[in-house]
Structures are given as structure tokens and as C-alpha cells.
Amino acid sequence: MSAPAPAASAVTVAGRPALRWRGLSGVWRPRMLAVTAAGLVLLVLAVAVNVGRGDFPIPLGDVLAALAGGGTRGQQFVVWQLRLPRSLTGALVGAALGIGGAITQTVARNPLASPDILGVTAGAGTAAVVVIVLGGGSSTVALSAAGLPLASLAGGLLTAGLVYGLAWRRGIDGYRLVLVGVGVGAAATAVTSWLLIAARIGDAARATVWLTGSLNARGWENVVPVSIALLVLVPVALLLAFGLGALQFGDDTATALGVRVNVARSALIVLAVALTAVATASAGPIAFVALVVPQICLRLVGAPRPPLLASAVYGGLLVVVSDLIARTVLPAELPVGIVTAAIGAPYLIWLLVRGRSARV
Amino acid sequence: MTAAPPRPAAPRTGSLRARRVGLVAALVVAIVALCLLSLAVGANPIPLRLVWTAIVSPTDSDADTVVRTLRMPRTFLGVVVGIALGMAGALIQGHTRNPLADPGLLGVEAGAAFLVVLGISVLGVTNLYGYVWFSFVGAFAASAVVFAVGAAGRGGATPVTLALAGVAISALLGSFTSAMVLSDAATLDAFRFWAVGSLAGRDATIAVDVAPFLAAGVLLGLINAPGLNLLALGEDVARGLGTNLTRVRWTGLAAITLLTGSAVAACGPIAFVGLIVPHVCRAVTGPDQRWLVPASGLAGAVLLLTADVIGRVVVRPGELEVGIVLALVGAPFFVALVRRRRMASL
């Protein structure tokens, strides 16, 4: 960029002060910051409450004490070994799905797009159901449970790779990518449906629980991979997001503004797929988070496109609150994916009825 | 896209009009051929000569019975449900201006599924005929709610709010459905077979029941097509040309609901047809809805009949549900098409 930059103070975007630092520039959006910060506070609270609730209730103060290393031995065990990993898995998986959805919707310029469109969840689902249905009956549950996350991770990444490879023709066109993803995803879903029909009813029920998304019996072994993925991939996504703004205007304008469109888009899609695949391997394809959270955040922040960080924070919040409801309010422990849709959908509807016209 | 110079959208073979007429003619011929095939093929193959006898001068032979009581209703349903889903797909993609929109977007399929599960788990309904009216009521109620939500916002029923309202209501109903299915193994056992979508085992009564709703939907869809062309110019331009936007919008939504609702009631939620068929047809007809809507209907029938016949052949003497065959056979074809040419944008 060789154009002489005017003095920063003289430049405002629609009445907002501009932020400039070396080659990077952004717009100061206090509302975005406030919404994200509020979401973080709520997320921490939700995790603490969720850890305290259950058959062995622990008051909020004792939960915080146990987290800080105090409390009784029993409280220590329940908090650290049983409930905290489950809540953390929920928060991290929700964050990964939320940010993955925000990236996909922006790249595809389509509010109906989510990483599901790239085939990643359909492929992961097929692989998982294959393991559940063909991996022997309930006798080998333990064996198949160990193989499930790996199988679904492999299935998701392979399917997404297939979609990407098939959609590549002298570059990636968002429209073509989405259509190829729909086709490949439909084929994978058909295999899943066929397995569900062919399966014994017990296996079909287990497969359905997995496909809804569940946090039952999730431990530290699920927390680690998702947190590593988030720590590595989210900063990269935030850096690449500078190009996202330009992509809004269409490829030609973005190219003219100096964004390497294909590189930026491909990298972002790979990030969204990786985040979603890791999240899905840990807790199943928790329904609706990737689709609805970016749209909710976009309306909360009043931004022109889904905000990435806010989508991550609120994705985590939605899943943890849903888990809390699933564990304490609902009769049988229904999987968390049922609740995410049941509380995310009315909220989105309320936002729609209140009617801030927003574009993606 | 890359910086490559723009290429013409498709290799031109003759004039656009000739291509459109050719497509429609080819589809009609294909439907007739597939109908005959559909009457002849199955666990018990019947030669075309005997099929013809069964149609024109039936006696009481086994072949006649199979053709007239089993395969005729099934073939008829294949044609009309295919037409319904293809047309509904073209209409919903036109109204939402979204290539990812499918007929289920307005909550029709989720509403139908919810009431079917309610019928199974609360009333113990387990026969196909019992499902029909449950799914009808669910389909219409759900899409009414979606319209209400989509139109309640300040901007009225814009494509984006409609689409999102549909997604939200579908997800909400879907979660109720999952909750009921997961709480009761018997319900899941009955529901998982309905949820795939199939033409098998439907008798003539079901076809007769849904026919008037389908006919109304087809009529409204054809009436709606020219108005949809005007909508595509953008709302302001359309208004400036004297279009009654509200009327066009509601006519289209009513058509989509009638078409999809009857299709789901008759055969369960058959995915994929409504989503891909319009894209395939658009590549030939271009974006003119007056051609695209009827062509998508005909192509939907071709696709559904083809998938149904294949499903009866591959795992004889058993059958593979049409919904599964559709995606497994249709997806590679669709992906190849998307790769081969630049798809006409919406």
C-alpha cells in the first residue's frame, strides 16, 4: 500500500474512529468489545454453575474454592475429575463450532452456510455411525468408544478434503464449493440413514445420540485436543480475518484492494473445517451452534458480518447453558444437542421479530 | 474466482429457446419411458408386453394384479412427488435468492416429522396411511409459523429473515422430535423408517388423498413464476414496474407449502431432489422462472423415478429406500455437473 495515509484522527468510518497500527487497520467498535466481554463473563459463570449442579450439589463459592485448590477431598474430586472436564469440553467445542460457523458464513457470503455445508459433519457422522453400527454390539462398546473420536475426525477431514478437491478448478469459488459440499454431504448422510435403518435398535439409538451431540462421560482426554486446536487456530483465523472484510464486496473488489482472495479463502476454509472436525470428534456434531450463533452475534453486535471472537464466546456459552439445562431440568439425560436447538432457535426468532435488518 | 477472463456461461448449442424446448421435450420422453420401466421392474420382473396388457385390457392374472395394485400407484406417486419437490425447490431458491435453499427450508419437513412422531408415540399410529394427515397438519402449521415469524420483523418477509426463520423453526421442532425419539426406542424404531423417505408400500388411496393439494400447488407455482422473475430484479425495481410484491411472495410461499407438504405426507421427507434439480435445470434454461419452474418439476420426476427403479434392482429381492438411492446416485452426477460448467448464479 503506497498511498499516503491521511492522519489517523482525520479518518473515520461512518462516524467511528479508525485504529491503525503499521499495516493493519480496523474500526473501533465499542459495542463489539462490550458484547464479547459480557459473553466471557457469562461463560465463566455458566461453567461455574454447571460444575456445581448435579447429584452431589456444590455451592458456587465452594466450586470456586475447589477450582482454586481448596475445598474438601470429595469436592476436589467431583469438580476436577468429573464435572469440570465435561463443562470445559462443552465450552471449547461450542467455541470451535461458533467460530467455524462465523468463518464459513462470511466466506460463503450466505447465512445458511455452516461448516456442515463443507461435508465435514456429514463425513464425521458417517464414520462414527459406521463404528457404532458395524463395530460390534454392546459387548465391544468400550472398544468402539475409544475408536469413535478418531474415526469421526478422520471421516470429517477426509470428506472435507474430498469436497475441497472436487470444488477446486483454477481456484476456489465460494458458490461452487458450497454446491459440491451439499452434494457430497448428501451422499454421506444417505449412507448414515441407511446404516440407521439396517442397525439393531440399540445401536440406532446410540448412533442417534451421537449424531445429536452429547457431552456424556466426556473427560480431560476430550478437553486437550479441542483446546490445542483453538489455541493454534483461532489466532490464525483472527489474523486472516482482516481479508474477510474485503471478501464481502465480492472477489473482484477484494482482489483490487490487494487481498489474495484464493489464498485467504482457502486458508479460512481449512481453519473452519479443522475446528469443526476436532469439535465434532469430541462431542458429536452438536446441532445448530455453528449455524445460529454467528447470526445471533451479528445482530447483537450490529456488525456487517459475523464477529469471530464473539461467535466463539457465545458458542461456548450456548453449549454450556444447554448442558446445564440437559443435566438438571430435563427428565432423562437427553443429549445436549437437543437443548442447543431448543434455546438457540427461540432466541434467533426473537431477534428476527425484533427486526434489525442485517446482511451477511 | 481467479483472475482468468470471464468465459461465456455455457457452450451455446443453438438458441436459448431451442435448448429450453429441447430440455422439456427430453424430460417428458424420459418420464414416459421411466414410467413403463417402473411398472415392469421389481422383485418380480414383468415383461413390457404384459405391462401393456395390464394397462389396456387387464384380466386377473398375477402380473396384472402386481402392476395395477402395487406399481401403478407407486409410479404415479413417483411422478407427482418428483414434480412437487422439483418445482418447490425452484420456487424456494427463487424466493430466498439462496442456492442452499431446499423445500424443507420453510419448516415443512420438520413440522411433518414432529407431528408424525407425536402420532407414533402418543397415539401409537404405525401405518403409512395414518401418517399422512399427521404430516399434512404438521407441514402446514410449521410453515404458517415460519411465515408469521419471517414477516413479523421490521423489514417484512425479506429473503434472509424468511430463510433464518425457517431454519430456526425447523431446528426447534427437530429438537422436540429428537427428544421424543430418544426417550422411547419403539418410537425411534417406527420413525427411522418414515424419516428416510420412500415410495414403497403406498397404496392408491394415499395418492388420491394428496392429489388435490398437489394440483393446487402446481397451479399456484406456475402462476407465481412470472412474478418471481420480477422479484429477481430486486424489490425496488419490481415495485417500480408495478408488481404487487406481497401477492407474489405469498402466492409462492403457499405453492411451496402445498407442494412440499403433500410430498412429505405421501412419501416422508425425501431430501436432495428439491435442492439439486433447480441447479441442474438452471444450467440449461437460464434464470427465467417461467421455464425453470416447470422444467425443475419434470426433472424432479425423472430423478425420483430413476432412483426408485434403481433402488428396486440393486438389492433384490429387498429394496433400497428411494431417499438413500437419490443421494448416492444423484450426488456424484451433481458434483460432476457443478465441476464441468460455471453454474448460473441466482
Image (spheres, coloured by chain):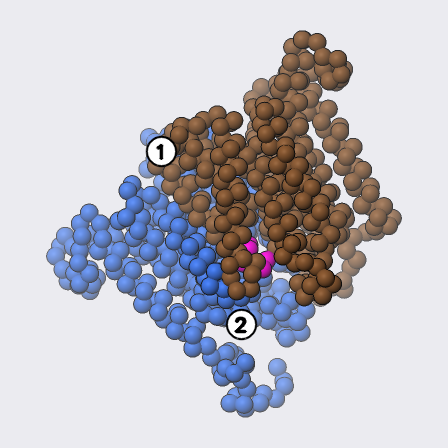
Chain colours: A blue, B brown
Which image quadrant is residue A13 in?
bottom right
In x, y percent, where is residue A126? 49, 40
Q: Is residue A218 left or right of residue B271?
A: left
In x, y percent, where is residue A286? 41, 49
Image marks 2 and 1: residues in contact by CB distance under 8 Å: no
Which image quadrant is residue B300 in?
top right
Q: Which quadrant holds the C terminus of chain A?
A: bottom right
Q: Is residue B201 magenta?
A: no
Query: Of residues A34 and A23, which is closer to you in this image?
Result: A34
Q: Chain of mark 1?
A: B
The answer to whether residue A160 is seen in the rendering is no
Q: Is residue B217 left or right of residue A18?
A: right
Whether callout 2 and callout 1 share a subunit is answered: no
Q: CA distance from mark 2 to mark 1?
A: 49 Å
Amino acid identity at mark 1 = Asp
- At horizontal 62% and vertical 28% (from top left) the residue drawn is B208
Q: Is residue B160 magenta?
A: yes
In x, y percent, where is residue A8? 52, 88
Image position of A355 with respect to A209: above or below:
below
Q: Chain of mark 2?
A: A
Image position of A189 with respect to A80: above or below:
above
Q: Residue furthest left?
A: A72
- At horizontal 33% and vertical 56% (from top left) the residue drawn is A320
Query: Of residues A209 and A234, which is closer to you in this image?
Result: A209
- At horizontal 25% and vertical 52% (from top left) the residue drawn is A83
Which residue range is magenta in the image?
Answer: B158-165
Q: Which residue is mark 2?
A: A242
Label number found at residue B184: 1
In x, y percent, where is residue A212? 41, 44
- At horizontal 68% and vertical 13% (from top left) the residue drawn is B64
Image position of A264 with respect to B77: above or below:
below
